[in-house]
Amino acid sequence: MNIGWYLSVSAIIFCIGAGGVLVRRNPLVVLLCLELMLNAANLALVAFARMWGNEDGQIFALIVMVVAACEVTVGLGLVVAIYRRRLPIDVDGLNELQG
Amino acid sequence: MVFTAIVFFIAAIGAITGAFGVVLLRNPFYSVLALAVHLVSLAALFLLLRAEFVAAAQVIVYAGAVMVLYVFVVAYVGGGEQLASGGVLRVLGPLFALALAIELCIAMLGAGLKGVNSKGAAYVPGFGSPRSIGELFLTKFLFPFEAASILLLVAAVGAVVLARRRHGLEPDEQFERQVHVPRPAWTGTMAEAGGLTMPAHAEERTLVEGEPVATPTSDRPDQEGGW
């Protein structure tokens, strides 16, 4: 398969994730959609690494996975803290910092 | 070649279907399961791109650890009420995604990279194997490797601090019990210092009330000796 096919799949997944972040209101699902976007970027990185025959892109993808794991951990901690405070689990209801 | 194409299309359809499932399914638990499907399909695509180690890490880290974390939190918080989407963003969100898709397509078609329409560089044995990835991590990319480990440590500590139970938000009954221990009657009073003993009716009252400390005479220092 040509590299372009992988890049198109990556672009489609990224757009689905971006749309999901905007549309969904449950913070858990927003985090899942962020994962989708990061994974799409990973796919593009690995595809470019294959295109150049260079492994640096795969290293980049692994670092992105580490950052995604950190983001998930902190995000789920926030969700649990929100739940403990009996606040609504809804990203539109949490607008105290809006100013 | 035909086999590669078949595997590619199955994995790509699985990944895109999983992504749609994450966004469209109403129950967050099903969204998590759809993300698991998406991640496994993506690992298959990584394997087709000769990234063995990244595919293995994807399955172990994502489909293993992160998914378990998600499932635990969804089970703890509960599926939540089926939230309806906001009015404006519900229309603008898909439009934005569509615009982004068109822009990415233009960028891809207009890219001057000749390699995009090729099958990639010639495959050398060992490309993407754990050995070569590990060598790169410990030589060329040592600093990002260490920075990633520190980032993981900070994130773990931060998650514990964020999600821990805080004193002061709600009354902590365990803490209250430790501080305000009900003292047995006739101890620590002026009467005890003066050597007076507990009257009989007071002891009866203590027993009737069912206080947990109903042994006033056993642990009292000998009454004749005083101090």
Image (cartoon, helix red, strand yellow):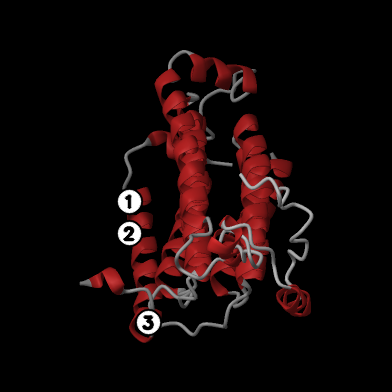
Q: Which mark is residue B107?
A: 1
Write the residue at 57% across / 82% down. Answer: B81
Which chain is mark 2 on?
B
Find numbered disc 2 in the image and state the secondary structure of the residue it sits on. helix
Q: Earlier in the sequence, mark 2 or mark 3?
A: 3
Going 40% across and 81% down the picture, which residue do you hit?
A: B90
Q: Nearer the viewer, residue B94 or B22?
A: B22
Residue B182 on image: x %, y %: 62, 66
Question: How far across and how far down the image is residue B24, in percent?
Answer: 56, 74
Name the residue located 53 percent from the left edge and 62 percent from the top edge: B190
* Residue behind mark 3: B91
Q: Secondary structure at mark 1?
A: helix
Q: What is the x, y in percent for residue B216?
A: 74, 61
Measured Cα–Cα span from mark 2 to mark 1: 6 Å
User: Is residue B13 among the parts visible in the rendering?
Assistant: no
Quick check: do tags 2 and 1 share a chain?
yes
- Crowding near the residue tagged with mark 3, few <14, some 14–19, many ≥20 C-alpha atoms within 10 Å: few
Residue A11, placed above or below residue A98? above
Nearer-N-terminus badge (1/3): 3
Quarter of the rendering containing residue B19? bottom right
Q: Residue furthest front?
A: B224
Q: In the figure, is residue A88 to the left or right of B79?
A: left
Nearest the eye: B180 or B163: B180
Q: Amino acid at mark 3?
A: Val
Give the position of the N terminus of chain A as an image quadrant.
Answer: top right
